[in-house]
Each structure stands twice: as C-alpha cells, then as structure tokens.
Amino acid sequence: MKHQLEFEKPIAELRRKILDLRRQSESHGSGVNVEAEAKSLEGKLEALKHQVYSNLTAWQCVLVARHPQRPYTLDYLNLAFTDFEELHGDRMYADDRAIVGGFARLAGERVMVIGTQKGRETKENILRNFGSAHPEGYRKALRLMRLAAKFSLPVITLIDTAGAYPGVGSEERHIGEAIAVNLREMMLLDTPILAAVIGEGGSGGALGLGVADRVLILENAYYSVISPEGCAAILWKDRAASSKAAEALKITAADLKRMDLVDEIVPEPLGGAHADPATAAAELKAALVRHLAEVRSLTSEDRLRGRYAKFRSFGKFSEPTPQAA
C-alpha cells in the first residue's frame, strides 16, 4: 500500500515481515520453520488489525475517510453498478467535474446515480477541484434528479466532499442559493431517493446531495456541519486542536446512528474501504438494494411524508424538569 496513516504503520511493518519471510521460504526450498513463523505472524497481524480498527478515535476516522486510496464515486460506479452513462452540464453555465452523474443499473434496476468525485493525482484533483463543487455542480445534480423523476427512476447520491467550493466565483454564481434550492427540491421530488456518505460528508456541500428517504454511511466515513480543522480554528483558535474538535462534533458513523441522523452504517472490510474496495462496494450495493426495495414499497404520499418527518426530527433537545421545592 503506497500511503499509510500513522496508526497503520505497525500493521504495515508486520505485513512487510510476513512478506520477507515468504520470500525467504521460497528462496530456501520448503522452509517449514519459516512457514510456521509466517503463519504465526499472520495471526498476530489479524489480531492487530482488529485491535486498531475496532478502536479508532473520531480523528482517526476522519483520516481514514480522507485516505487517498479510498474508493471514490467512479470506483463504486464501476464496482457496484453497471451500464453507467454519464451526463454533463447544468444547461446554464458549465459542466462541473467535481460532481458526476448519469443513468446506471443497480442489480439490474435502472437508477440515476449522482456523486461527488475527487482526484487521485494533481492533474485530476485540479480537474475535479478536490471534490468541492461550484454552484453549477449542484444545478447539474438537480437537473439529473428532475430527469430521473420524469422517467420514474430512483435517485442514488454518493457523498464524498469536504464541502462546496467557497471561492469568489462560486459566491458570485450563488453557491448558497444553489444548495438551498437542492434542499427544497429534493424534499419534494416524487421519486425514491437514497443517499450514502462514502467518505467525507462536509457541511452544506454534502447536504446539497443528502436529502433522501434513507441516508446510509460507510463505517469509517464522517458527516459534519464543519470540518474538524474549521471547528478547531473557530473554537480553539488553533487548527492543532482538530482531534479535540472531531470528538466534540460527534461526526463518526456510530455517533450519527446513535442520534438517528443516519439510517444504517454500512460495514467496511477490516482495514477500511481502501484495503479492499471490491468488498466495500459489495456491502454498499447490498445495502442500497435492500433500502431501495423498502422505499419502493411505500406509496408516493407516505414516502414524501416520511422524508419530511425524517429531517424535521433533527435537532431535538430536552430541558430538565424543575424539581419541586
């Protein structure tokens, strides 16, 4: 693996030792003793991986969600969907490459898939604007959603963005308005909508694709009103407090499920989705197929009412009952 996070280094070191022993075994014939030691180390490797990935802190989850080898939207389109046909442009300004979308099939069923897309290397990151969309990206997404509704196709959104692009041009073309219109129109769109947070779910940039009948999140993804770094800069005046901010924000999949802000946590293979993209895609596909069948079984009226009630229920609070004197 080309890129290792700090807490992954002991795992990588143990994996290297096993590979070295395997090579030694091959170069010295049968190598029975070497093989026995390698198997012993493999057992230790699995135990170490379970120990590390079962006890990730909130900040470590953020780092896994941002892993440069983590599967992106186009990877899932190749692994979990078939017959993808990309559509381009918002018919008003431009084609924002930070958001991709088009017709596809999920387990044989026709759907419209829309998602944010990051790049793997510098040239592609510039093309995709690091997964941060301009207003025309959200307007393209809405155009495709309306097209899906016209043909009674379900909409599936895949979310992986640090947030919408906050630059001057983005503000000049009304990024806030574009996201707000998406929120309104997705709430009213008369077709099944599923959303899945596959990596980063940052601020309004994520929510602009996140109004859905069911919201899923991968095990090591996060969903937050602000990045941990942004929160740390505001509250602690120091971005070095990002790990503290991540804990306070309650942005992990487990925290979000506990607060009923997501409907299901989709498990990832041990080591994260980047360790085994095919298995991660299979898990996501199974969850999407199951939820789509459930949502499809609802009447249009019940589906829209449930979607509205879901988001109206967010932000609940309670006050302590005054004790009698």
Image (cartoon, helix red, strand yellow):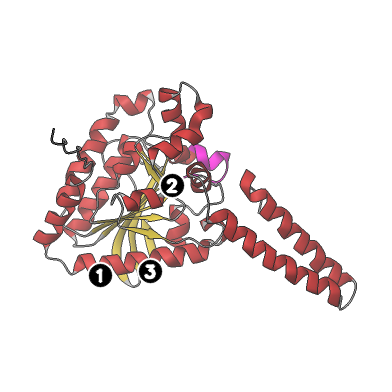
Of residues 229 and 143, the one nearer the viewer is 229
Distance in Å between CA atoms under marks 2 and 1: 26 Å
Q: Amino acid at mark 2?
A: Gln
In which quarter of the view is residue 48 placed?
Answer: bottom right
Q: Residue at x 26, y 37 (%)?
A: 179
Q: Residue furthest right?
A: 28
Q: Position of residue 42 (x, y in %)?
A: 70, 67
Within-10-Å neighbours for mark 3: few <14, some 14–19, many 20+: some
Q: Which mark is residue 117?
A: 2
What segment carries the magenta color?
118-126
- Mark 1 neighbour density, 10 Å: few (under 14) some (14–19) many (20 or more): few
- Secondary structure beneath dot 2 equals loop
The residue under the point 81% across, 65% down is 21
CA–CA distance in space, label 2 to label 3 = 22 Å
Residue 293 got which mark? Answer: 1
Identify the mark at residue 132; answer none if there is no mark.
none
Mark toward the start of the polypeptide (3 vs 1): 3
Q: Amino acid at mark 3?
A: Ala
Q: Residue at x 16, y 38 (%)?
A: 321
Specify the farthest residue to the top.
237
Residue matched to label 3: 286
